[in-house]
Image: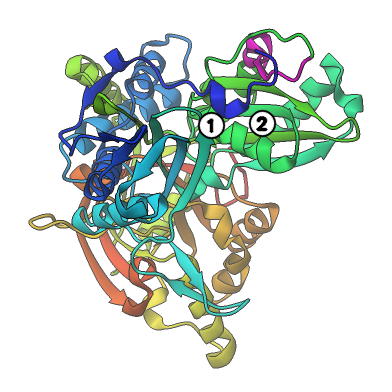
């Protein structure tokens, strides 16, 4: 098997793991397999629609294992229970799994004997199907297009998509559709290491630093992939993305030096241990920072050694499609089994019963005094009105502060929740609703807190030293909500949602949300103590 390309070893499972798609059948013509344009377009629409609401069964199993693990922390089990409840709700297809419905990605492997009718461009057909899914399902438009080097605006259709089609031999087309949220995508990294790290202790130290640097902002529990080597950095990152999706699971577990890529089970176990020891857990602290790991070794140029890391988040949304002369097949996706629902609900109720109750009102600030009295690591249930504002709203508000020497009155007094929900479907009061990463707003915090705004913030993940200092100086509080449970939030914890300012910013407009017992943890208390600060 010497010199087999990485693409030739992609794991696509057996046809027994797939179900047929009712699409126009491929036709044999002059030794080629011809696919109809309408079928490809519809295939893309179906695939992206499925993964807006459903995940592979292995992801549900991962949540269940955390819930059943007697050694898991109380918060590990609480977060996993919420993630499982979220999956049960999103499986009803009223709310998507996550408010960040992601960038539309397709990894494809096209046989050299595959043709498309009238020679229509394959990528364009897949893009058209993605656009239909986002429009019909009212998924969030998150893509920003440049106006110039410094300015940008929302593209309003979640395009462009990221599509990579590679050539293989034969008369088959393999496609993996992925909806990648911004939080997990930003965890990807590449470095060029010295070959001196090719010692067990050195590599382990480097991996410890890189895995700990992932932090909780990308919605763990993660699937973490590491790729060591590569003919160039681009190949390393590509392989890491595929590995995190499980597409390289069939690589051989040994090699003979001829350039064949391999998978190392021993180093996967070491990575799991490192993840467990990080203490981040499933977002709020514990041992379940990762549900799976993959360690891939590639060939390299003697002068450099790429090291790539990639993750899939708790909303691990992907589905594979296989097309050959027998028809169209798609990976089976279904909602999780409800056999664990009672256990998950029991854990949620038991843990919530110990939480502090915070009732926000605009008539007095006693709720703020209570939040300031709580220590880092305390769980709370927040009810009442909060402002929703993200990156572009913060940037506009900072410009207003600099020009007017003050912030608008409506931005003073209420907690600020860093969030951008999906559009509500007909008959629903809101779309999927959940936190974005707190750290992106850190540079605004000191300026806003000086004038009495953003005293309490709600988001996900860790914050910088700069933010921690601002919070301690102004006796603010940072509350971390659970990332990846946007359907659960919309169904159970949100009473009302209205846009109040900056409507032109689309999903980044400022809104006011009325919460009903939203679970959070005091991640940074009013003294600056931080649960994520090791």
Instruction: Name the residue at the left extreme.
Output: 427
Q: Residue at x 49, y 66 (%)?
A: 391
Q: Height in image: 502 above or below 187?
A: below
Q: Nearer the viewer, residue 30 or 130?
A: 30
Residue at the disc numbered 2? 211
Q: Residue at x 60, y 73 (%)?
A: 447
Q: Height in image: 450 above or below 169?
A: below
Point out the image quarter for the N terminus: top right
Point out the image quarter for the C terminus: top right
The magenta stretch spans which residues?
A: 258-270
Instruction: Name the residue at the front extreme.
Output: 30
In the rendered structure, the answer to whether residue 280 lies left or right of residue 48 reads right
Q: Quadrant of residue 228?
A: top right
Residue at the disc numbered 1? 242
In the rendered structure, the answer to whether residue 447 lies left or right of residue 182 reads right
Residue 269 belongs to magenta span? yes
Residue 18: % across, % down: 27, 21
Q: Quadrant of residue 414?
A: bottom left
Question: Real-space Cα distance between discs 2 and 1?
Answer: 18 Å
Residue 66 belongs to magenta span? no
């Amino acid at each position: 098997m010497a010199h087999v390309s990485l693409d030739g070893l992609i794991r696509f499972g057996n046809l027994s793991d797939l179900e047929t798609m009712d699409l126009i059948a491929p036709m044999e013509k002059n030794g080629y397999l011809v696919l109809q344009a309408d079928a490809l377009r519809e295939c893309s629409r179906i695939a992206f629609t499925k993964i807006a609401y459903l995940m592979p069964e292995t992801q549900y199993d991962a949540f269940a294992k955390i819930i059943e693990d007697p050694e898991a922390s109380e918060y590990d089990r609480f977060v996993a229970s919420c993630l499982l409840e979220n999956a049960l709700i999103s499986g009803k297809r009223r709310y998507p799994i996550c408010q960040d419905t992601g960038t539309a990605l397709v990894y494809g492997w096209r046989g050299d004997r595959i043709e498309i009718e009238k020679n229509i461009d394959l990528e364009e057909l897949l893009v058209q199907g993605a656009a239909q899914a986002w429009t019909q399902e009212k998924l969030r438009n998150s893509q920003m297009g440049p106006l110039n080097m410094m300015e940008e605006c929302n593209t309003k259709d979640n395009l462009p998509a990221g599509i990579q089609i590679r050539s293989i031999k034969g008369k088959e087309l393999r496609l993996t559709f992925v909806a990648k949220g911004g939080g997990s995508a930003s965890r990807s990294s590449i470095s060029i290491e010295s070959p001196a790290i090719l010692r067990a202790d050195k590599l382990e130290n480097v991996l410890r630093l890189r895995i700990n640097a992932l932090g909780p902002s990308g919605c763990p529990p993660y699937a973490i992939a590491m790729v060591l080597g590569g003919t160039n950095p681009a190949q390393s990152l590509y392989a890491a993305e595929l590995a995190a999706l499980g597409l390289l699971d069939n690589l051989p577990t040994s090699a003979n030096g001829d350039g064949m890529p391999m998978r190392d089970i021993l180093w996967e176990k070491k990575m799991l241990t490192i993840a467990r020891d990080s203490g981040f857990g499933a977002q709020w602290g514990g041992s379940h920072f990762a549900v799976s790991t993959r360690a891939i070794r590639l060939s390299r140029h003697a002068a450099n050694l790429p090291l790539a890391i990639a993750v899939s988040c708790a909303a691990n949304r992907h589905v594979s499609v296989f097309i050959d002369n027998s028809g169209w097949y798609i990976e089976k996706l279904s909602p999780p089994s409800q056999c664990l629902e009672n256990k998950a609900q029991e854990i949620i109720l038991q843990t919530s019963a110990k939480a502090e109750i915070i009732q926000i009102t605009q008539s007095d600030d006693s709720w703020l005094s209570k939040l300031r009295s709580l220590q880092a690591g305390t769980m709370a249930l927040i009810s009442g009105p909060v402002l929703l504002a993200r990156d572009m709203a913060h940037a506009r508000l900072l410009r207003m502060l600099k020009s007017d020497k003050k912030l608008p009155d409506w931005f003073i007094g209420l907690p600020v929740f860093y969030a951008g929900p999906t559009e509500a479907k007909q008959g629903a009061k809101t779309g999927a609703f959940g936190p974005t990463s707190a750290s992106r707003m850190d540079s605004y915090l000191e300026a806003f807190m000086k004038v009495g705004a953003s005293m309490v913030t709600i988001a996900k993940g860790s914050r910088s030293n700069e933010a921690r200092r601002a919070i301690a100086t102004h006796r603010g509080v940072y509350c971390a909500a659970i990332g990846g449970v946007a359907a659960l939030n919309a169904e159970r914890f949100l009473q009302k949602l209205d846009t109040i300012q900056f409507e032109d910013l689309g999903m980044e407009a400022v809104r006011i949300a009325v919460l009903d017992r939203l679970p959070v943890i005091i991640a940074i208390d009013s003294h600056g103590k931080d649960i994520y600060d090791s």
